[in-house]
Amino acid sequence: ILYGKEIDFLAKDKNTALEFNGLYWHSENGGGQIKTYHLNKTKGCLSHGISLIHIFENEWRDKQEIVKSIIRNRLGDKTNLIKIHARKCEIKEVPIKTKDAFLTENHLQGPDKSTVKLGLFFDNSLVSLMTFRRTSRFEKSSEWEMVRFCNKLNTSVIGGASKLLSH
């Protein structure tokens, strides 16, 4: 589908592709890749209605359980995924220490420097988290930036992102 460019794994029935990127061979210096190499592959897949997940070597090495959870969610793994409806959850502000621990456990990039931390709680347990900060690092005219969003490992919170964002 990418006219001669390789994709490591394609699940046509899920419109999802996976690309495993070694740090050396998929870099500008080591592999001689152009700066937009990965973005171009992502856009190429999207033009065919396929969502491409990039997995970098260090993410697989250091945060394998998070990567597996992302893949399970994307592929809709019914046997290893807990499904919770956001309408059954309560929105609460999350303390910094709780936010940092949750992001360390469940987000590839880990803790952030956010000012607003909102969580969805199901049976008093944090199952989804969205964080924001004033002014964007990238778009100076923006008033707010969403910094992180994630669900608890191996958990799908249906409507969670919408509920947190609209709040």
Image (cartoon, rainbow, N blue to C red):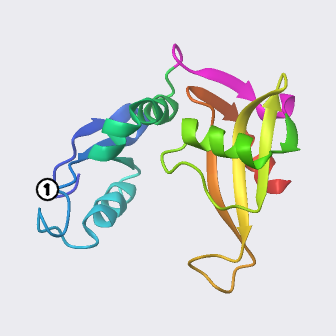
Residue 37 screen position, x and y as percent: 24, 66
Occupied quadrant, residue 71: top left
Q: Is residue 39 above or below residue 150?
A: below
For label 1, the residue is 25
Q: Is 3 placed left or right of 109 in the picture?
A: left
Q: Is residue 156 left or right of residue 56?
A: right
Location of residue 46 by image quarter = bottom left
Q: Amino acid at mark 1?
A: Trp
* Along the line of sight, the residue nearer the viewer: 166 or 120: 120
As for residue 153 lying within the magenta part, the answer is no
Q: What x and y, as percent, mark residue 90? A: 88, 35
Q: Is residue 85 magenta?
A: yes
Please say if 82 is above or below 104: above
Residue at 80% across, 45% down: 94
Quadrant housing residue 87:
top right
Q: Is residue 53 left or right of residue 81?
A: left
Disc 1: CA contacts within 10 A as few (<14), some (14-19) or many (>=20): few
Q: Which residue: 77% across, 52% down?
A: 117
Residue 56 visible at all: no
At 51% across and 27% down in the image, what residue appears? Answer: 76
Question: In front: 115, or 75?
Answer: 115
Q: Is residue 5 visible?
A: yes
Picture coordinates of residue 150, whole percent (x, y): 62, 43
Hey, which residue is sitting farthest top in the picture? 79
- What kind of element bears circle 1? loop
61 lies left or right of 26: right
Q: Residue furthest bottom?
A: 141
Circle count: 1
| Residue range (magenta) | 78-89
